[in-house]
Structure formats: C-alpha cells, structure tokens
C-alpha cells in the first residue's frame, strides 16, 4: 500500500496509442460513448421498420425505391419481422444501454469523482472495451447472414433457439447472437472487477464511502450486480451454444433436457440486468437534480441504502417473468410479493428526488429537464410494473403490448432520458465545450411528447389483448380495429426518430463550434468539476492530489457566501481542516 501519488509529466504519445489503444480511462469512456451512440442509431432504425410493418401490414409500401412486401402486404416477410424484433431488443439492451451507462459514464466518471488518477487496472480496462469488438462485428453480421437474423426474440427461449436450422432465423444468425453476447458478458465482467477495485482502493484522501456522489455509489452497486449475475448468463449461453453445435441436450427435451432451465438461467441474470440498466441513471439523476436545484440531496444515506435494497431484491424476483410457465402457485405468490416489495425502495428514491427539488432555486437546464423526465417516466414504468407483477393480471397481459409499453417506459423513458441528462450535464467535462441549450431543449420537448405518444397507447393495445412479436397476417386481421392506433403510434415514432437527429447534430456541431466550457460551468461541488480542468488532463486527471473535506451536495451552505461548497475546499475552522486519511495503492499493478 502506498499513498496516492500524482504526476504532472503528461508526455506526448502517438495518435494510435493515445486515442485508439489507450489506457486512459477517459478515452476508453469516450470510445464506449461513440460506439454505443452508433448502436442506438442502428437499433432505432430497426424500430422504424418494425413500427412501419405494424402500421401498414396489408399495404404494398415502396421503400428506398423498391417495392418490398410480404404475402398480403407490409414491407418485410414474417420471419424477417421476428428477426428485426430480436435484433432491436438485443442491440438496444446489450449494445447500447448497458455499455453506455456502465461503460461510457462508468469509465469516464469513477476516477474523476473519487479523486483517482486512473482505474486500478488500466490495461484490463483497455481490454474490457476491445474485447467487445468481436461482439460488435458478430451482432452486425447476424443481420445479414444466410438464413436471416436470429428469430427467437431477445430472450432466445429454448427449444426454438437450441435447434439449428429448425425454422427460419435459427441458423448461423442465432449462433452469432450467442457468441456475441458471450463477448459482451466477458467485457462486462472485466469492467465490473475494475470498477469495484478502483472505488474501494483508490479514493482520494478524505473520500470516505459516504462522501461519494450517488453516481459512483450506483456504479459500484451496478458493478456488484454484474459480477454476481453475468456468470449465470454466460454459463447458459455456453450450454445453449453446445446444444446447437455439438449435439448436447441441456435445453432439448428430446434428449432429456429442460427448456424451462434456460428461462430460469436467463431471467436470473436478466432481471438484475434491468437494474444494471437503471441504477446508474438513478445515480446520475440524483447528482443533476441536486446541482440544478441548488440544494443538498434529500436523504443521502437513505438513497444509498435504497439502491442497495433494489439491487438485492432484484436477485429474488426473476420468476415473475415465468408466471405462465406452470410454476407452483405458492412459488408464484412468493415471487409476486417480492416483486411488489421493490416498490418500497423505489418510492423512497422518488420521494427524495421530489423533496430535493421542492423549494429549490431551480435552474431549468436541458440536463435538469431530462433528469425530471427520467423521474416522471420511471414512475409510470414502475406503476405499470406493479400490474405485471400481480400473478392474476400478468396471466392476462403476458406477452401482450402492455409488457412492451412497461419495458419501454422503464428502459427508454427511464434509462435513455437518464443517458440524455448525463450527456448534457457532463459533455462540457468530456470535451471542453458546451452543448447548445436551445437545440437541447427542442430535442427534449420533441422527445418527451412523441415518446409518450408512441408508448402510452401500447398499454391500450395490451389490455385489448394484442400480442407482441406478431408476424402472421391472420393475427393482424384479428386486431384490425386497433390499426388506426398503430398507425398513429408509428407516425409519432417517425417524429421521435427525427427528434434524435437534433441531438446528434447538436453533439457534432458542439464538438467543433461549441462554446468553450469553464472548468466548472454548473458550479457543482464534486471533484470532477472542482479539481479537474475541462477536459481533464490526458493522464493523471489532476495537477495535484485532491483532498476531500465534505460530501458532494453541500449547496446553499451557511459556511460560505456562494451557494456551492466544493468537496476539496478546506473549511474555515482550522481544527476541522484534517480530512479522514485514506491510504490507496498506486494503480496499474495488474
């Protein structure tokens, strides 16, 4: 163990070493950022095709100058439609939301917020990004291989996914899907180990655990979830790949296997994965709401404990995805009760967010608006989740568009608004330039309105029994009275997609022409704002080691005249000037 050392000798490196194969956590975070924004575009384009098919399944629609239609109409064949649904869900979850929140923001922010000069294992951090490139290439190849993209849904339920070439979309594309997720899981595990080690061992002097920002707390708990849950999915992916390639029968009943075993293994990971996709956004939202309300975060300790409770309960509720699988009613009741209990810590967080805003001197920045939208949409997603958690109700709405609406309110209304809030808030720190606030607010208003116009009607479709993943024209006929609503949702989706072009233009323009940012344009208290330049130094982050004297949310403190009190500013009373001593190792000892 050595004390936290700092070097100001930032020697120049070749372009490839500095910006491509870099061990600097900030560069790796930005690599994750741009890669995941690319996959957001791919996933969004697939969503446009899906919505078009749902809106006009019987018409022959010209697309890109060619007349592409299935038997009876539409723009794609039934098996192609299921493949696009599979790829849309997979790309958005495993290639956008998870690597964006944990990879991009986690890499960039953790060392800066705790006062470390880099991750504990910089070379392992480099590997955690580049090991994903086989996954990137394989998932894109799966869209175009012979036999079509995988068509077993993003959940890839056995035995459909375990039988090679049994149906269209169960060939090479399905195998590439499995292999790509294996690499994603491995990259996530490497990152999680690095995050936990960095946070526990490399904090600056005085940075106790309960002086960390909620963003870092959320990323620490998320990394713990990844470390505990991902090996289960990885094992299941290996077993399913063996079923497909060497003739084992882990999930095939013809050889004594259990198809339901896949569901148990998949959901034991994938329900905690919901919190892997939402907890970092909760932490980021907490930081943003406190900063722009100019008030201390209400109930800091309760917020930390509620994140822990949500993560812990997330491990014991996976069975609520399987209420219609024939499970014992007593077991189903236990899953139902455990699921509903999650509403308690979630309500604590919601109350504390609202209490933080209440009576504050609110600054209506684009980051704040997106953070408030995150809270609002998360509430709708959570309330609709209570219906899905009730076994008698879920039996009726299972696999209907009600579930699709719930999922998107949590992961689009929640996670994506959290991502937008984080980008608008930390963009000046990442790139040293400000995003355009007017364009940001136009993007926010269009996104918020059209998001609700697209996804809230899904609850109406769901209670009317419309199933998701429809491909059969006969099924479309059964729900012809709802076709007008589907068309309205699709037109709204086009506007929603177009609104994201405003965001991408804002990012691209601001990178080149944006106003240069101050080191602390938001007058925030945490170390990345008060101890580092914008952007931070290429290696080392800080000119001198920061010393922490207080928590990150000391706004409107009576000890200082201004309404912010940086973590690294010594208090006026001399006897209070000695921070708690934190001894940390020098990073890079992997």
Image: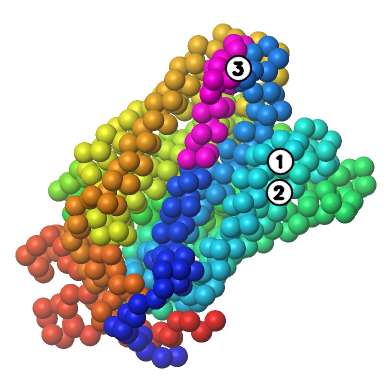
Image coords of residue 269 (percent x, y): 63, 53
The residue under label 1 is: 145
On the rendered image, what quadrant is the N terminus found in? Answer: bottom left
Write the residue at 34% across / 51% down.
423
User: Is 103 situated above or below 289?
Assistant: below
Q: Residue extending furthest left?
A: 561
On the rendered image, what quadrant is the C terminus found in? Answer: bottom right
The residue under label 2 is: 176
- Element at label 1: loop
The answer to whether residue 382 is visible is: no
The answer to whether 351 appears left or right of 124 in the picture is left
Q: Nearer the viewer, residue 60 or 183?
A: 60
| Residues at marks 2 and 1, CA–CA distance in whole angstroms | 9 Å
- Give the quadrant of residue 366: top left
Image coords of residue 429 (percent x, y): 28, 60
User: Is 36 situated above or below 156?
Assistant: below
Tags 2 and 1 touching, CB below 8 Å: yes
The residue under label 3 is: 67
């Amino acid at each position: 163990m050595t004390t936290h050392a700092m070097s100001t000798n930032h020697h120049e490196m070749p372009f490839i070493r500095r910006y491509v194969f870099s061990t600097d956590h900030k560069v790796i975070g930005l690599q994750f950022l741009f890669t995941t924004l690319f996959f957001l575009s791919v996933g969004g384009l697939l969503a446009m095709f899906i919505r078009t098919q749902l809106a006009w399944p019987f018409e022959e629609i010209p697309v890109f100058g060619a007349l592409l239609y299935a038997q009876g109409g539409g723009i794609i064949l039934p098996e192609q439609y299921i493949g696009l649904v599979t790829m849309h869900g997979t790309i958005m979850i495993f290639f956008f939301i998870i690597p964006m929140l944990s990879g991009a923001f986690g890499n960039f922010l953790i060392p800066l917020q705790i006062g470390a000069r880099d991750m504990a294992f910089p070379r392992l951090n480099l590997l955690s990004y580049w090991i994903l490139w086989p996954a990137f290439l394989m998932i894109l190849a799966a869209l175009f291989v012979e036999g079509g993209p995988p068509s077993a849904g993003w959940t890839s339920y056995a035995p459909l996914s375990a039988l090679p070439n049994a149906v269209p979309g169960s060939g090479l594309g399905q195998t590439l899907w499995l292999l790509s997720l294996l690499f994603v899981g491995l990259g996530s595990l490497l990152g999680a180990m690095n995050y936990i080690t960095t946070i526990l061992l490399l904090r600056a002097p005085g940075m106790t655990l309960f002086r960390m920002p909620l963003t870092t707390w959320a990323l620490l708990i998320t990394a713990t979830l990844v470390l505990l849950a991902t090996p289960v999915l990885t094992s299941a992916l290996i077993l399913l790949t063996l079923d497909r390639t060497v003739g084992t029968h882990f999930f095939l009943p013809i050889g004594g296997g259990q198809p339901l075993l896949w569901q148990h293994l998949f959901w034991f990971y994938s329900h905690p994965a919901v919190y892997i996709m939402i907890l970092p956004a909760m932490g980021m939202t907490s930081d943003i709401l406190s900063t722009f309300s100019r008030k201390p975060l209400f109930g800091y300790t309760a917020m930390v404990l509620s994140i822990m409770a949500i993560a812990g309960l997330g491990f014991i509720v996976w069975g609520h995805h399987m209420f219609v699988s024939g499970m014992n009613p007593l077991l189903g009741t236990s899953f139902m009760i455990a699921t509903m209990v999650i509403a308690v810590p979630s309500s604590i967080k919601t109350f504390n967010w609202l209490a933080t805003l209440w009576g504050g001197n609110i600054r209506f920045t684009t980051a704040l608006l997106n953070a408030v939208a995150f809270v609002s949409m998360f509430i709708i997603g959570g309330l609709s989740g209570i219906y899905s958690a009730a076994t008698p109700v879920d039996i009726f709405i299972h696999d209907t568009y009600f579930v699709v609406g719930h999922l998107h309110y949590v992961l689009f209304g929640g996670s994506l608004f959290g991502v937008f809030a984080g980008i608008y808030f930390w963009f000046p720190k990442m790139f040293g330039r400000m995003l355009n606030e007017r364009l940001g607010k136009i993007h926010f208003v269009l996104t918020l309105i059209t998001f609700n116009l697209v996804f809230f009607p899904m609850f109406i479709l769901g209670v009317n029994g419309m199933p998701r993943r429809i491909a059969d024209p006969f099924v479309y006929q059964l729900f012809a009275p709802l076709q007008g609503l589907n068309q309205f949702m699709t037109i709204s989706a086009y506007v929603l997609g177009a609104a994201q072009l405003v965001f991408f233009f804002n990012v691209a323009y601001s990178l080149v022409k944006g106003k240069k940012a101050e080191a602390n344009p938001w007058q925030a208290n945490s170390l990345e704002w008060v101890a580092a330049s914008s952007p931070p130094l290429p290696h080392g982050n800080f000119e001198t080691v920061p010393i922490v004297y207080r928590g990150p949310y000391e706004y409107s403190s009576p000890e200082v005249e201004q309404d912010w009190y940086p973590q690294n500013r010594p208090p006026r009373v001399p006897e209070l000037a000695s921070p708690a001593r934190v001894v940390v190792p020098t990073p890079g000892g992997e």
